[in-house]
Amino acid sequence: MLNKDDSSRTTNGEGSNETVHTRLIDAPREIVFNAWTTPELLAKWWGPKGFTNTFQQFDARPGGLWTFIMHGPNGVDYPNQCMFVEISSPERMVIRHISPVHEFQIIADFEDIQGKTKVTFCQRFETAEELNKLKKLVVPANEENLDRLVEVVRTLTRQE
C-alpha cells in the first residue's frame, strides 16, 4: 500500500496551533474518502493503535453530529462529539471536535495523484499553547490513525 518513497510527512512548526500529517495511499480517492464517510469503515480505523470505537450517532452532512466512544487499550472510555462542518466528496472533509475536554478542528484533504490518494490531515487547535500541551500525544496518535486508515483501505482494494 505504501511504497518506500510514499512515506508520511508531519509538520508542526514552533508556535503553530496545528499539526499536519500527509500520507500517499495506493488507492483511488473515492475509496479513501469512503473510508471516512462510512461509519462501519471509520469505526475500524479511527483513533490510535489499540483503540476501538462504538458509534452512537453518525450523520455525515454539514451540521450533522457524530457521537462515539473511543475505548482505550487500557480499558478507559473516551466520549467524543463532533460536528461535520464540510463534506465535499471526494476532495475534503472538515470536522469540529466539540467535546468538553479538547476542542479542535480536523481538515482532511484528498488529492488524486495518478490514481493514488494524498491525504493531508490537519488538526487545528484554538491556540498554539493548547497544541503544545498535547503534542507528545497528538502527533504519534495521528500517525497511528493514518496507519490504521491505510490498513482498512488495503482491505477494501483487495476486495475489488
Image (spheres, grey):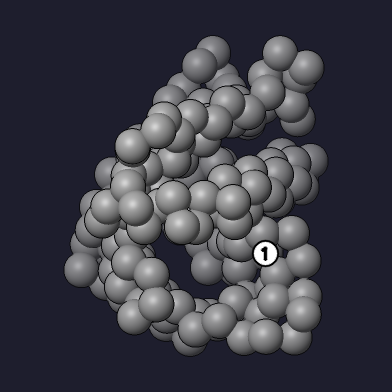
Q: In percent of the image, x 39 and y 77: which residue is there?
A: 101
Q: Position of residue 28 (x, y in %)?
A: 56, 30
Q: Residues within 10 Å of mark 1 (few under 14, many from 20)?
A: some
Which residue in the structure is indicated by mark 1? 44
Secondary structure beneath dot 1 equals helix
Q: In percent of the image, x 26 and y 56: which residue is there?
A: 126
Q: Position of residue 109 (x, y in %)?
A: 39, 36
- Position of 153 relative to 47 (above/below): above
Q: Amino acid at mark 1?
A: Lys
Q: Report whether residue 125 is seen.
A: yes
156 lies left or right of 93: right
- Position of 80 relative to 105 (above/below): below
Which is more toward the observer, 107 or 134? 134
Q: In which quadrant is the C terminus drawn?
A: top right
112 lies left or right of 76: left
Q: Position of residue 17 (x, y in %)?
A: 32, 44
